[in-house]
Image (spheres, helix red, strand yellow):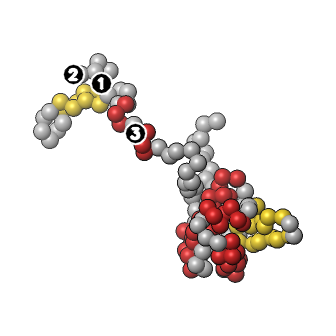
Amino acid sequence: MLNNDATLFTDPINGELVTFPSRPNNKARPSTGDRLEPGVPFLTGTYKWEWILRADEAGAMLVAVHLLRLATMRGSDSIQFGAGRTAKELRMGRSTLYRKLEALQAGGLIDITRQPKVWPVVRLLGKPTMRHTFSNRRR
């Protein structure tokens, strides 16, 4: 059955009539099972591959990717977070998290500012996130 709005053309290879609907087909949308559920962590953004490789060389790529995720969500290269909760999210102990943060600091990827009774502030160094400027963007 042809849609009246459909664009028609003849396939040059086999001569069959081909239609392209003017409106997207609802069946082409992802199923609800493919969508993220609220509260499920995900990573979005554009990052410098060299920064991630250096984090891997330091043995702390999971922590580094988590820091990139937090920085993207908060829109800042300085991140303050609770070590206990973060360690639990990453399925590691707090002491392991601190060792990995120190490894990233020794590798020149982050700077950590600690103060008594305050969560540490981690600043990402080397501008790991790449910000795009789109001149054609409509506002």
Q: Position of residue 110 (x, y in %)?
A: 71, 72
* Viewer can see residue 70: yes
Q: Quadrant of the N terminus?
A: top left
Task: Give me the residue at 56% from left, 44% from top.
Answer: 38
Q: Position of residue 114 (x, y in %)?
A: 82, 71
Query: Which of the two discs, 1 and 2, labels the residue nearer the N terminus?
Result: 2
- The kind of residue tagged 1 is Ala
Q: Is residue 104 left or right of residue 19?
A: right
Q: Which marked residue is nearer to the observer: mark 1 or mark 2?
A: 2
User: Residue 6 shows which numbered tag?
Assistant: 1
Q: Residue furthest top?
A: 4
Disc 3 element? loop
Please rate how many residues cluster around mark 3, counting C-alpha atoms within 10 Å: few if below 14, some from 14 to 19, many from 20. few
- The kind of residue tagged 3 is Ser
Report which residue position mark 2 lands on: 1
* Viewer can see residue 101: no
Q: Is residue 34 left or right of residue 46?
A: left
Q: Which marked residue is nearer to the observer: mark 3 or mark 2?
A: 3
User: Residue 73 shows which numbered tag?
Assistant: none
Query: Which of the two discs, 3 and 1, labels the residue nearer the N terminus?
Result: 1
Report which residue position mark 3 lands on: 31
Question: How far is disc 3 from disc 1 in space, using C-alphas?
Answer: 25 Å
- The kind of residue tagged 2 is Met
Q: Which marked residue is nearer to the observer: mark 3 or mark 1?
A: 3
Q: Is residue 74 above or below residue 125?
A: above
